[in-house]
Amino acid sequence: MAEEETQVIVGLEVHCQLDTKSKLFCGCSTDYRNDGPNTHVCPICLGLPGAMPALNKKAIEYAMKVAKALNCGIVNEAEFSRKNYFYPDLDKAYQITQYDKPLAEGGYLEIESDEGGEKKVRLTRIHVEEDPGRLVHMGNVERGKYSLVDYNRAGIPLIEIVSEPDMRSPKEARKFLNKLRATLEYLSVFDSEKEGSLRVDANISIRGSERVEVKNITSYKGVEKALTFEVTRQKNLIRRGQRIERETRHYLEARGITQSARSKEQEHDYRYFPEPDLRPLRVKSWVDGIVLPELPDARRERFMAQYGCSLNHARTLTGELKLANFFEKVVAPDAGGLSPLASTWIADTLIGELNYRDMSLDKVDAESFTALVDLLKAETITDKSGVEVLRVMLDQRLKNEKTESPKAIVERLGLAKTTGDTGAIAAAAEEAINENPKALEDYRNGESKALNFLVGQVMKKTRGKADPAELNRLLTEALKKRGA
Amino acid sequence: MTSIAFGPDDRYHAFLTVCGKPSHGAGKLAGVPVAVKDNISTAGIETTCASKILKGYVPPYDAHVVGLLKQAGAAIAGKTNMDEFGMGTTTENSAFGPTLNPCDTGRVPGGSSGGSAAAIAGGMVRMALGTDTGGSIRCPAAFCGIVGLKPTYGRVSRYGLIAYANSLEQIGPMGKTVGDVSTLMSVIAGYDRHDSTSRDKPYAHTPKADIKGLKIGIPEEYFGKGVDSGVAEVVKKAIGRLEDLGATTVPCSIPSMEYALAAYYVTCTCEASSNLARFDGVRYGPAADTKKSWHDAYQEVRSAAFGTEVRRRIMLGTFALSSGYYGKYYAKAQVARENVKKDFLRIFRDVDVIAGPTMPTIAFRLKEKSDPLSMYLADILTVPANLAGIPAISLPCGTSEGMPVGLQIMGRHFEDERVIDVAYAYEQAVS
């Protein structure tokens, strides 16, 4: 099969909840996640007869911030429309959204392409709409006895960001989402940690075939998984000479697969028309008053210039607002001295250890981490001991145990580097050579691997506390004494 | 808070709900019983829109205008009968039976605010609230011989009015006299942050009877085909009276009226199809059979609980908004609507108000209008004001065949005061 025929084409429609204090069309609080069902509701978001929407200007301001950050143009006159459909979670039986006159058009987001380097993913539009309520099925949706409706979510402001089909792999789609999330968080308009704050519909096709829409993706990882599943499914169909149907599929997160939606669901005719209860939105002039904060790309450049971070480290550190803030806090006491160690210890070691524990960065305080980096910088401990100290620190915080300072951990576990105590290292070297005559023999025969092995043995005997340079020197001396 | 006793002899079936001992506070309307059309939300008082689907629905909140009434000391006397969801011209389309015209109980009171008009004409209350989407205040005012004002669009908050056609309708005052209508208007008008289409144009006006030098436009279409000659005669005589008071008349024409009815019916049915979609048997109306799929259950409830005219308009609106038809119907209707507005703006460059009959005929006999099309045609003289959003009042100006005839005065946007003054001048001259 020619390369052309397997080209993957992906476009995304991303729905994000805007992190406003009140809902899009009423004064109800958006902070409902820890409260009981239907406790953040009023006649407006319940869609009671006679209630009318009154636009939350803050939501529009937030959406315009996003539009400006993503290089979109604000239209002269935007309009809200009604999208009419029946669904039990939709209180008015229509959703107030934007149809042919969205708030913003055009724009782009830069991501790291699969080939390396930056690439622009063009955007089609950004519009504002209200979130519907939520159905809670008692038991299973098909066999459960009944379903309940919770309208706490109804009326939460959403923006829908629609991209052009500019992504070429599931991985690029994931990168687009990560970059988008970072940008929204830098703008302080979005909280990615709130459950259900992001929902994605993806359009995916293999060049030359029909496109398939995958709905219902609710996590960052889910996008890559769902699309990878689709690529395999579609390529297999093509390989077998079958045609790909133009259809809507649902992503089943738990099973990691997509499933064809029932055909009835695809026959929607939403009968859009302008919402007569809201006036046209003429807000283009606001855009000049919007001051954007430093965005991920700019911060990445700054991290490289100011802290000497490598491109990869800078990309990782600035890829999440919290992480970038954490880094800057850690190095704040001595940027010049701490940055080189801190960037690798945060971007590589800390992230790995946090992911392993499925732990949030929120649990780690920058001060303690600075103290750890200080110990490493002063060469009080070896890298290996550093990892051990970090693990203890994280485990104490994860289990909500009493926390110790890195220094206290080093003292309690006796992890201080054994500099100067050459006797102990030399003795360990002698011991290692004695216990491994085969390695000595190999070394004599010029096999450099044998030295590495012996270094490992000595390290083990000194419990990782030996200074690597000193260890190397003493071991080589001991070997020389044996005529090697 | 004190309360009054309210026990009307409702032989015309004007009320759906009577509040026997309504309480009230102090203010401009202290202790005045005011009837409220049943599509305006009243906290704690059943509000049905004269539909089976809302039977038992008790709103947890007051419409903005009801709050204003209470602040002014009014006593909410009860909820008045209407055509279901405002869809009709006779109040015969009520799920709870028709209202009778107090002037002749063999005739309809007009609609859709027929209950409010009959409550006033029958002497049960001095004033009432109605709503006017295509003539629903002015038609029953004309048929029952009372005064009714459709304010400029945006002058009175619609918050709490159960929507039929949002872009056309207004809540307005109805009363025995122009003075009462003006007083009620001063209570309900003004900006409301809950209604984004409302404007900051409060009404604080005392009617004045001086209309010397006033220029009145007389559109030929208001005295043309379909207008009963008896009605036309009475109205012409009334306009002559205004001339006697110092006004001059100018003939004019509204060519866009040819498309006004079509534009009106497309717009209102489209909006209605969307507004009424929420009544699905889950939260309103007789409980849906949950053993069925929800699509089937919705269908069953909606077929059974909506009346014929409501179902007809929902179907028309649903069709007109369907993919492939939007441009043909809804979009075209909006163009026609703009043309109507332009015609009025052009005429208002030369005249101060426009006068003509409110309705082309006197009140119909009960069940006289059986086919929907001839019923729709009766709205021809009232819908232009809704399409253009201008203020329009109907006041009694004599009788034809013993039944009241309404004189309609239309004015420029936000010149409700001038419309009131012209009506007041006439009223003072004949009383």
Image (tube, rainbow, N blue to C red):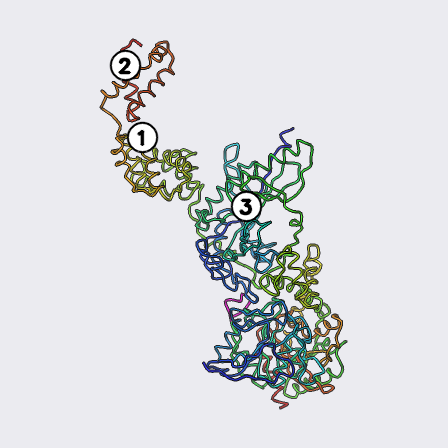
Task: Tell me the kind of residue under disc 2.
Answer: Ala
> Of helix, strand and loop, which one carries label 2?
helix
Task: Tell me the kind of residue under disc 3.
Answer: Val
Q: Which residues are magenta?
A: B191-199
Give the residue at mark 2.
Answer: A478
Indicate the quadrant where residue B112 lies.
bottom right
Give the residue at mark 1.
Answer: A385
Q: Is residue A385 above or below residue B421?
A: above
Chain letter for the residue marked with disc 2 in the picture: A
Residue B193 highlighted magenta (yes or no): yes
Crowd class of label 3 (few under 14; some 14 to 19; many from 20; radius 10 Å): many
In the picture, which quadrant includes the C terminus of chain B?
Answer: bottom right
Looking at the image, tell me whether mark 2 or mark 1 is earlier in sequence order: 1
Query: Same subunit under labels 3 and 1?
Result: yes
Q: Is residue B238 above or below residue B321?
A: below
Q: Most prominent secondary structure in the magenta stretch?
A: loop
Chain letter for the residue marked with disc 1 in the picture: A
**Mark 2–mark 1 distance (CA, rounded to whole Å):** 25 Å
